Amino acid sequence: MTKKTITITNNMDGSTLELPILEGSVGPMAMDMSTLYRDTGLFSFDQGFMSTASCHSSLTYIDGDAGILRYRGYPIEQLAEKSNFLETAYLLLHGELPSADQLEKFDSIIGHHTMINEALTKFFDGFHYNAHPMAIMVGVVGSLSAFYHDSLDIQDPHHREVCAHRLIAKMPTIAALSYKHNIGEPIIYPQNNLGYCGNLLRMMFATPCEEYEPDPVAERALNLLFVLHADHEQNASTSTVRLAGSSGANPFACLAAGIASLWGPAHGGANEACLDMLHEIGDVSNIDKYIAKAKDPDDSFRLMGFGHRVYKNYDPRAKIIRKVSHQVLEKYADANNPMFELAMRLEEIALKDDYFVERQLYPNVDY
């Protein structure tokens, strides 16, 4: 195969530099600029990494213009329809979907790690009762490195695997304990005869005084959300984890850093920002006023949950989750709830208003 290169000419002194062109299995080609500074004394400038690939990866492919998302080559639509979250996690870790035997073994391994050290449960008592759950997650996930010393070497493949299993298994337990602490209810321990999402729902919403059976509608919706969010290329939180990991820091510390990044309203915190926005608008009667504010370039108000930095088409994840989310809302939401009516009306306007359509500001997965 002919080696592809591109020639860069420096207009300051007329010198030239040949840079290799790297070709991936799918998507645009990349220019290898790793020798640019060494050979020219110049840096590249790419604010926000809009045109930069920082590593070799075969995990996730996104084409924002076409609205495509694939994990390990599998379209997200196919995984959402046919796979559960643990199958998807296995795919991302190992490169292929598991066989029935492999999935059973993986499920058993995850189940083995769902509990957290009992001493760690006492940490939650040190947080204020109304602490933000992401603040608790940053602290508790970071503290895992003080309990699980046998999987801290990021250079050891076995350590990385054990750490990944522990994080996948313990994250629902930590999230549920954070919620229980916030509402003042006793903690509910994992029950491994339930599925991954059913277990989380039980730990969140069960109480010791009565039996709890996870609702299949809610369980299916939660599973779908986890599949759709399992990976999203090198976003802010992933890049944060990689940057922390480049120092040799242990995986738990790196994940805590990633959670801190995820917390931001321009990233994972966007769904919370959507709720805050709905509360600010307050009532259907105020929609026209706030739509006008959103269109005014001199007004700081923004409609949260519309448009996406990567997807310039309809977010493929939003298309998938919309149907199931409406099933959940139809079952659990009060149709007369002003907030529900407001959210539905706002979505309707955004899908029809020329201002939003022309700018491709479709409701995204956060909304």
Image: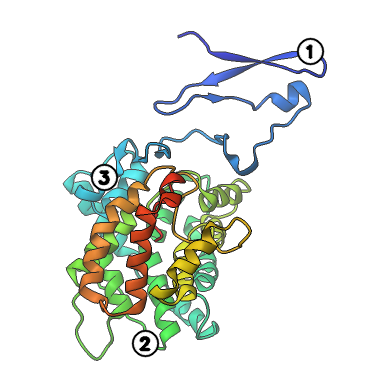
Residue 355, labelled with which disc? none
Vertical arrangement, residue 349 with respect to residue 68, above or below: below
3 or 2: mark nearer the eye? 3
Q: Earlier in the sequence, mark 3 or mark 2?
A: 3
> Relative to 198, is 352 on the left or the right?
right
Vertical arrangement, residue 224 with respect to residue 102, above or below: below
10 Å crowding of disc 3: few (<14), some (14-19), many (20+): some
Vertical arrangement, residue 164 with respect to residue 358, above or below: below
Residue 186, labelled with which disc? 2
Q: Position of residue 276 (x, y in %)?
A: 48, 72
Q: Pick out the residue farthest to the right.
A: 13
Q: Earlier in the sequence, mark 3 or mark 1?
A: 1
Q: Amino acid at mark 2?
A: Pro
Residue occupying the point 19% across, 48% down? 82
Q: Nearer the viewer, residue 3 or 151?
A: 3
Residue 14, labelled with which disc? 1
Residue occupying the point 18% across, 48% down? 101
Q: Nearer the viewer, residue 76 or 87?
A: 76
Residue occupying the point 54% across, 82% down? 127
Q: Amino acid at mark 3?
A: Glu
Residue on which disc 3 sits = 77
> Relative to 19, is 197 on the left or the right?
left
In terms of secondary structure, where does tag 2 sit? loop
1 or 2: mark nearer the eye? 1
